[in-house]
Structures are given as C-alpha cells and as structure tokens.
Amino acid sequence: MRRIKSIFFPTGRFYFPLLLLLFPFLLFAAGRMKCAWCGRKIAPGRAYYSLKNKNYCSRSCADRSLERSLPQCSVCGGKIRGAYLSSGDKIFCSRKCYESQLPQCTVCGKRSAAGALAADNSFFACPDCLKKPRCFACQIPTDGRRLADGRVICPKCAESAVSDEGEARGCFQLVRNDLKHKLGIGTEHPIRFFLIDQETLHRKSRGESGVVTEQGLFEYLAEMKTVVKRNLLGRKISEEEKKTSERFHVYVLEGLPKERMEYVMAHELGHDWLVTYFPGIRDPAVREGFAEYVGWLYNRLHGRDELNRRIESNTDPVYGQGFRMVKAIADKEGFEGLKKFLDSRRTGR
C-alpha cells in the first residue's frame, strides 16, 4: 500500500505596494542632464520628470521606465500595477491566476489548496475526495463499483480487471515465458497457478493481520524423508533429511487490472527463481527486494513506467528499501554480481 502525504498551500494574501512612490514628479532642469530612458539631453530650464532618483525628458519616457520595473504575474506575465496575490516566491495578478496553479484533484478535477499527494506522485486528492473509499488495486479514492467481497474498484482499473481463471492462466504463462526467454529468469519445474478471492489469499499469506493488502503469494512445499544408514551389525552410522517431493504454487488475487496482475505474477515468479537457485535466504528485505526487482524488470520490458514509479517510491522498509538495495547491486555489479550477493546471503549451505 502506498503512503499518502498531506500537503497544504498557503492561502494567497493581498499585498499593496506603496504606489505613492511610483508617480513621476514634474521639475525644471537647473543644468544639463540626460534622460534615463531615451538618452536625450535635457537643456537647462526645460521641464523634466523625476522618478526613483532618475530623470526623464518626458512623461512618456518616465511611464515606459515605470512599466518595465513593475512586477509580473507568474502565470499570465501581465504587469501588476496594484494589489496582488502571493504564494511562496510567486505573485499573481488575480485569484484566477492564483487558483490555476493549485494542484488538481485526480478524482473530481477540482483545484484545491489543501489535500493529499501520494508518495509516488501517482495522484492528488482534495479533502472531500479523501473521504471516499480507495480502489483496492491502485489505491486512488473513488466512487467506483463495490465488489461482492466488499472491495471497491475504480472505473479505470475495472476496464481491464481479470476475474476469469482461464484468462489469468494464459497471462501467467505469458509472464513466465517472458521472464525465462527475454530476461533469463526462469525455472523448469511445473508451477500450479490459482486465481483466488481476497479472504483465501489473506488466510494463506498472513491471516493473523487485520489489514488486507496482499495481491499475490508464492508457496513452496517440500516433503522430507529421514534416511538412516546402518552398518552390517545394524548400528546407525548416519542420518540425513532428503526431499521426496516438491510443489510450487502461485496465488494471485482475482479482479486485478491486467497490467498490475502481470506485475504481481512476475513478483511471485521472482520468489520461485530465488527458492530454486538460492534457497536458504532468510532476510525478508532480500527476498522481497529481489522479487520486486523482477517485477520492475518485467514492467520495464513492457514500458510500464507508472507501475515502476510506484515500486521505486515505495517507502516500506522491506519491499521498498529491499528493492532499492537489490537494484543498486545489479546496477553496479550486473546480474552476475547480484547472483554472488544472493549466494552470500544464504544460510545452511
């Protein structure tokens, strides 16, 4: 789940410049001088105008100089001759220009001086829209459809939502093929795929929690057998545990939009690859960070930058920081260097 940060914009205030100091004064030259605007000479006894300690041969030159020195609106660029609005280091000639710079609510389209911005900048919501339920897939507040199990889905996510198990299995096979043949991250053993409801996924993953945020799960099951070796006299000389069978399962939440479902599948297949080639890694940040990195690689392969921005900006200490740690190693050492790192984090080798 993405973290939301609240932001508040300072209310614009009216500021009144001291206009009395901006009017040119008519005087008469006592000696020779030059016009500060056009450069013409002002003969003694001729009328001239003085403004801000500068002299001008005519009112027109004084007005032009004054026009150039007036502040400009940060939006329309118009010269400001009277009161104006200010916010931070910007000034505005009108409330219309000021409000045009406020963030626009992703949900209702209104511009608001207060609200909340997602940590990954994926959306901004005004105070009214923040009261709405959030889409279970993208977490954006919505008036969208409520599903039978209580989840709410926004119209955009609903357009490509996958609830048919046959369609989901097809997606899963395509994702597995892409990872194996295009990214070199694949395994040979059979994997059973399941499209399941929220309650079942929650129960399988971490049923002790009251917060349901899971969207996928990888499950590895191994049956072990104790093998005892004895000598000719029947005395035990050794004992070891051996695997008699292995099962690999991937569970994905039904109703996810297609692109997000494929990212979740890639994440879970990252766990499958890690368990197969580098078993015994206990650090959750390494396990989840690598799985997120595989999902990130898959998104990049298909040009899904929005999903990757969410991965990159995730502040979670396991998923977000784990991803950044794994990616930094891969960027510096390459995938072979990442393999060496993973091998060094195994226990019981």
Image: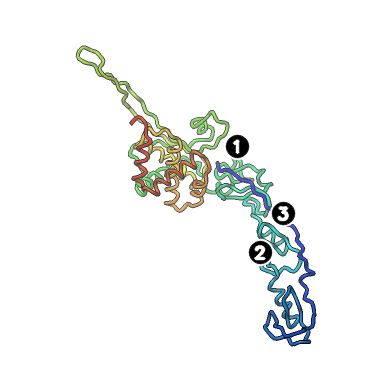
Q: Residue 207: where, in percent of width, then height?
A: 53, 29
Identity, as a three-letter code, of the amino acid under mark 3: Thr
Q: Who is closer to the viewer here, 153 or 206? A: 206
Q: CA distance from mark 2 to mark 1?
A: 47 Å
Q: CA distance from mark 1 to mark 3?
A: 39 Å
- Quadrant of residue 148 within the rendered picture: top right
Q: Who is closer to the viewer here, 53 or 196? A: 53
Q: Is residue 347 left or right of residue 36?
A: left
Residue at position x 45%, y 41% in the image: 289
Q: Residues within 10 Å of mark 3 (few under 14, many from 20)?
A: few
The numbered mark at residue 127 is none
Q: Earlier in the sequence, mark 2 or mark 3?
A: 3
- Quadrant of residue 89 within the rendered picture: bottom right
**Helix, strand, or loop for circle 1?**
loop
Q: Is residue 28 left or right of residue 314?
A: right
Residue that sits furthest to the left in the current view = 232
Identity, as a three-letter code, of the amino acid under mark 2: Ser
**2 and 3 marks in contact (CB < 8 Å):** no
Q: Residue 36: where, in percent of width, then height?
A: 69, 79
In the rendered image, which residue does mark 2 sit on?
A: 74
Q: Is residue 241 left or right of residue 14?
A: left
Q: CA distance from mark 2 to mark 3?
A: 16 Å
The numbered mark at residue 11 is 3
Q: Residue 302: where, in percent of width, then height?
A: 44, 52
Residue that sits furthest to the front in the current view = 31
